[in-house]
Amino acid sequence: MNSMETKKKIINAVIHLVLILVSITMLVPFLWMILTAFKSVTEATSVDPFVIFPKVWRTEAFTSVVKNMNFLVLYKNTLLLIFFRVLCAVLTATMAGYAFGRLHFKGRDFCFGLVLFQMMVPVQIFIIPQYLMVSKM
């Protein structure tokens, strides 16, 4: 009984250690990005990887962004874009689900296979062709 409790404690400690290491791995790039925002351009683009903290903490980048960007308009545009994309996705997914589930038509299995294939392919594959199409327009 005692050895089982000890074994459970060791397993829990190892799991917690792994989770802590993974969380540190995830947080380091985010913290690096925040610290780089306070550096000068020469400090930020220098090749020396051991300069983590800026020599002089600068806030010009933040004040420049706040002055030049209208965040209310940006938030409004983002919310409208998300709302209409979600609305269209829900409507088309509902109609397609009904059609594939209830209706029997010629080529239904092929069309359903195309829908499944499109859902399985990662989104990143479509980014370059979309960029090329938009750049040629």
Image: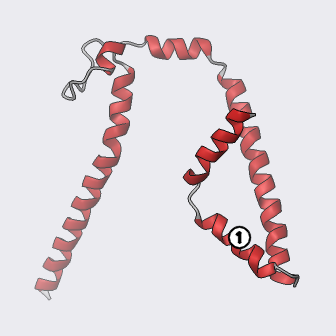
Quadrant of residue 68 within the rendered picture: top right
Q: Residue furthest left?
A: 3
Question: Can the viewer see residue 60?
Answer: yes
Q: Position of residue 107 (x, y in %)?
A: 82, 79
Quadrant of residue 103 within the rendered picture: bottom right
Quadrant of residue 76 within the rendered picture: top right
Question: Can the viewer see residue 78?
Answer: no
Q: Residue at x 17, y 80 (%)?
A: 5
User: Which residue position is annotated with label 1?
Assistant: 114
Can you say which quadrant of the picture contains the N terminus? bottom left
Q: Using the image as rendered, state which of residue 32 and residue 101 is in the foreground.
A: 101
The kind of residue tagged 1 is: Leu
Q: Is residue 66 left or right of residue 78?
A: left
Vertical side of 105 occupied by 91: above or below: above
Vertical side of 76 occupied by 55: above or below: above
Q: Residue at x 23, y 70 (%)?
A: 12
Q: Using the image as rendered, state which of residue 7 and residue 100 is in the foreground.
A: 100
Can you say which quadrant of the picture contains the C terminus? top right
Q: Is residue 67 left or right of residue 115?
A: left
Vertical side of 117 occupied by 39: above or below: above
Q: Position of residue 129 (x, y in %)?
A: 63, 46
Q: Residue at x 25, y 66 (%)?
A: 15
Q: Tag count in the figure?
A: 1
Vertical side of 130 occupied by 58: above or below: above
